[in-house]
Amino acid sequence: MMAELPNNKENLPQAHYRELYAALDPSDVAKRTGIELQGPAFAFDFLGHRFTAAFPEFELMCEPPSAALTGHAAQILVLRYLIRGAATAWQGKFLSYRELPWGEVYDANFNGRCRIRLARTYGKNLDGFRAAAENLGGTPVKAGDAAADLPLPGGITVRVILREGDDEFPATSQFLFSDNIVSAWDAEDLAALGEVIISALKEGKV
């Protein structure tokens, strides 16, 4: 069960999360999340990159370097996962955003921030999407006109699906989440995650 944190998380200073993080028991974090503790840092894979999060003074680094994956939004996501997330087994289902707890409440927000934005970016550039997804450790899957499963910590997967637009109909996209994501982040977090994924896809200018 995830620990409760205040709402409106994007408006809270990162210092708030850094304080909570510094007070953690690192062995408990490793046990709860399945993330390896290597000396004074946690080490994990996230979207095809190898990350280290220094402890107790939080500093996030990744290889290969990525501004999108180490920026403010990504740092908040990592901090919140380490503070209150847990690794749980996938039960075999993928959930749409609306099917997540509180997802229906925030779906319109998620649609504008993530689904529409991704469709506009790659709806007429499916090859570019496929190459960009591969750069993030994505595995191609058969869905829509182009789709990939993107790997997150804790055995979590985000499936990103694109349907190509034409002169008559606009492109559309979909994000599906492996059901174990509900033990890692909440619906508000996942809107930020969607934006981080899109920024990381675009980062390579593929």
Image (spheres, rainbow, N blue to C red):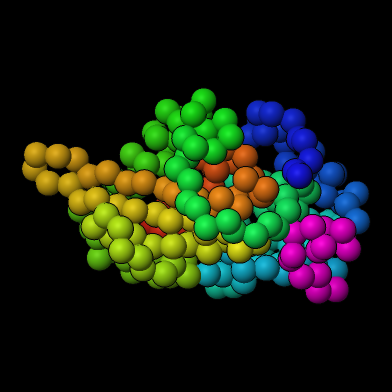
Rendered image quadrant of residue 138: bottom left
Q: Residue at x 32, y 46 (%)?
A: 173
Q: Is residue 58 visible?
A: yes
Q: Is residue 194 visible?
A: no
Residue 160 part of the magenta-drawn span: no
Residue 55 against residue 112 in the figure, above or below = below
Q: Residue at x 76, y 70 (%)?
A: 36
**x, y percentage for residue 131?**
33, 69
**x, y percentage for residue 152?**
57, 61
Residues in magenta?
Answer: 26-39
Q: Residue at x 72, y 50 (%)?
A: 85
Q: Quadrant of the N terminus?
A: top right
Whether residue 167 sits left or right of residue 85 in the image: it is: left
Name the residue nearer the viewer: 45 or 105: 105
Q: Residue at x 49, y 29 (%)?
A: 104
Name the residue nearer the viewer: 15 or 143: 143
Whether residue 171 sits left or right of residue 5 in the image: it is: left
Whether residue 88 sits left or right of residue 31 in the image: it is: left
**x, y percentage for residue 122?**
28, 53
